[in-house]
């Protein structure tokens, strides 16, 4: 077994995670459905990598994500922090002992009501053999989610283990107020929270036979960055040999709502410096806007709705991590090719000549057909960087890439063979200009596309067909099509270790120096209030400069001349 434990810290990280687990739940359902497409029934993916088997006290078998989710109190909506499967006790039990005989004033808030989607799930599981009060139609469910998602549990179709969902009690604020590194700096260590969170992680790790890595998602736009950094520091001490893949994820709204003040710039610099210190690979995800990107040619986004933008990032997360759970075989099967574990990816991207741990993640959704009419849509030119602040078309002869392609189509209605995908990728790189060719490119292929579950947002345009094929003419007048119209999508993702990420690094290093370290710096009071001394900031700056010099060897020379 090559288990992976997933950690999600912060609001947007849990939005991304909710979509990710919906994809997995859909795959599980399709694999066991005798009427589903054979490509889903024979996907050659080992779901035990992500899931654990168990049973309730009543002896009912369970299959739940190996997950620790951390968020603010009240972020679970209608869901209990113990999930929905293990209802061992009631929170409303009476206590026979009485120590107070005075008047009691009880204040109760109205519990949140389940939306149509959650109502339908409840009825499927609990109203068996009984007359349903009202049949809920799929089109009404899709409509209610597109308009009314408030928290990540509103569209989650997965069941969670009682150890999975952790709420930060005692913080009387909402996510808008939990908005900088300083405000979250002591949250992990206070009130036994850190100990409780680590106990939950330990529960999942200790039952693994051979853990291959930890996939860590953090919404690093505010105080959760500090919570995650302290969590990671504890993990580094306890799980020294377990590689951590860290994704920092940000919603477009979090970036639009934040003017780049001194505090914001220092937050970005300190957050990145701290988080990157405790992982083997750091991948920033989150464009200031998805509208107007390459992806918007076939997808329609609403940057103001995390329910929509998180779906795109979750699809890329799913695709990029598929090689970790491909069934390893002595030779490539007809369904998958080139499985790898977490450590292999880390060594591939960071161990070839230079020690760059900051990777770029690109995605094409839907990926173009291999032999379609859209000749300009080659696999390489259709890829959109999901990492912010990167340079396009940079010349880097030391770049290393790892690509994964799911469910590629040979034509509008025919799935491509693994060998055909390999040949198409080889041809794309041969046609690329010299400066666009990496030093090394790894390719993994799965014939199984991304399934589109019912609660997926209606973001597909009218040039996307039922199997995610790119059409030559609109299929309808509707600009917003969802899971009732599109059932699966081919997806291509690519990790890149490239000097194209230099602007991301240089901006953070420069802001830390100029705003936090220099004598009389504008942000000196801010970092002091956050509890950072000058020496600690200088150490961060030194680490950032080493990252820059790995990708730009001339950096140290120019620094020395200064």
Image (cartoon, rainbow, N blue to C red):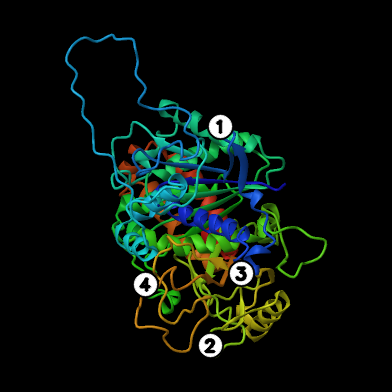
- Give the residue displayed 67% in from the left and 77% down from the top: 421
Q: Which image quadrant for residue 306?
A: bottom left
Q: Tell me whether the residue at label 4 lies in contact with that at label 2, contact meaning CB atoms closer than 8 angstroms.
A: no
Question: Callout 4: 10 Å neighbours few (<14), some, many (20+)?
Answer: some
Residue 498 appears in which quarter of the rendering? bottom right
Which residue bears the numbered disc 3?
37
Residue 376, which numbered label? 2
- Residue hosting label 1: 58
Q: Which mark is residue 375?
A: none
Decide which of tag 2 and tag 1 comes sooner along the chain: 1
Q: Which residue is mark 4?
A: 291
Per the model, the C-alpha gap separating discs 4 and 2 is 21 Å
Q: Position of residue 261 (x, y in %)?
A: 29, 55
Query: Where residue 76 appears, x then y in whole percent?
Result: 38, 43
Q: Earlier in the sequence, mark 4 or mark 2?
A: 4
Element type at mark 4 = loop
Front of the two marks 3 and 4: 3
Residue 509 located left or right of residue 99: right
Q: CA distance from mark 1 to mark 3?
A: 34 Å
Q: CA distance from mark 3 to mark 4?
A: 33 Å
């Amino acid at each position: 077994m090559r288990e992976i434990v997933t950690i999600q810290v912060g609001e947007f990280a849990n939005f991304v995670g909710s979509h990710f687990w919906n994809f997995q739940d859909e795959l599980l359902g399709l694999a066991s459905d005798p009427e589903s497409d054979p490509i889903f029934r024979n996907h050659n993916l080992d779901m035990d990598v992500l899931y654990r088997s168990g049973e309730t006290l009543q002896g009912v078998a369970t299959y739940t994500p190996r997950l620790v989710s951390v968020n603010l109190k009240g972020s679970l909506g209608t869901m209990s922090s113990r999930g929905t499967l293990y209802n061992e006790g009631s929170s409303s039990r009476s206590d026979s002992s009485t120590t107070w005989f005075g008047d009691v004033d009880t204040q109760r808030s109205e519990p949140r009501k389940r939306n149509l989607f959650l109502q339908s799930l409840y009825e499927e599981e609990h109203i068996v053999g009984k007359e349903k009060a009202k049949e809920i139609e799929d089109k009404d469910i899709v409509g209610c989610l597109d308009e009314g998602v408030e928290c990540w549990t509103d569209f989650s179709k997965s069941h969670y283990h009682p150890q999975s969902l952790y709420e930060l009690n005692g913080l009387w604020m909402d996510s808008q107020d939990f908005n900088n590194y300083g405000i979250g700096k002591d949250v992990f260590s206070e009130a036994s929270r850190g100990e409780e969170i680590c106990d939950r992680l330990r529960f999942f790790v200790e039952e693994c036979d051979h853990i291959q890595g930890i996939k860590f998602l953090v919404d690093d736009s505010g105080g959760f960055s500090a919570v995650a950094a302290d969590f990671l520091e504890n993990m580094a001490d306890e799980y020294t040999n377990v590689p951590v893949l860290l994704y920092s994820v940000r919603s477009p709204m979090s970036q639009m709502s934040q003017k780049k003040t001194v505090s914001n710039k220092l937050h970005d610099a300190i957050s990145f410096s701290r988080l990157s210190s405790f992982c083997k690979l750091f991948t920033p995800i989150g464009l200031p806007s998805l509208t107007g990107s390459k992806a918007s040619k076939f997808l329609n986004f609403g940057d103001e709705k995390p329910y929509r933008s998180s779906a795109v990032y979750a699809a890329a997360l799913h695709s990029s991590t598929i090689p970790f759970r491909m069934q390893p075989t002595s030779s490539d099967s007809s369904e998958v090719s080139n499985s790898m574990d977490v450590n292999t990816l880390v060594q591939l991207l960071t161990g070839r000549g230079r020690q760059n741990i900051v990777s770029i993640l690109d995605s094409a959704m839907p990926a173009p057909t291999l032999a379609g009419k859209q000749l300009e849509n080659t696999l390489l030119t259709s890829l959109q960087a999901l990492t912010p602040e990167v340079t396009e078309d940079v010349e880097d002869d030391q770049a290393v890439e790892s690509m994964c392609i799911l469910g590629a189509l040979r034509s509008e209605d025919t799935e491509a063979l693994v060998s055909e995908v390999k040949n198409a990728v080889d041809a794309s790189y041969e046609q690329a200009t010299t400066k666009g060719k990496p030093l090394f490119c790894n390719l993994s292929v799965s014939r199984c596309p991304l399934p589109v579950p019912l609660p997926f947002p209606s973001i597909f345009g009218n040039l996307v067909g039922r199997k995610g094929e790119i059409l030559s003419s609109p299929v309808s007048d509707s600009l917003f099509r969802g899971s009732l119209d599109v059932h699966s999508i081919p997806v291509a993702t690519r990790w890149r270790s490239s000097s194209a990420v230099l602007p991301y690094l240089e901006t953070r290093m420069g802001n830390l120096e100029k705003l936090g370290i220099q004598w009389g710096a504008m942000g000196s009071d801010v970092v002091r209030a956050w509890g950072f001394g000058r020496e600690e900031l200088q150490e961060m700056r030194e680490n950032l400069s080493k990252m820059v010099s790995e990708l730009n060897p001339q950096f140290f020379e120019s620094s020395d001349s200064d």
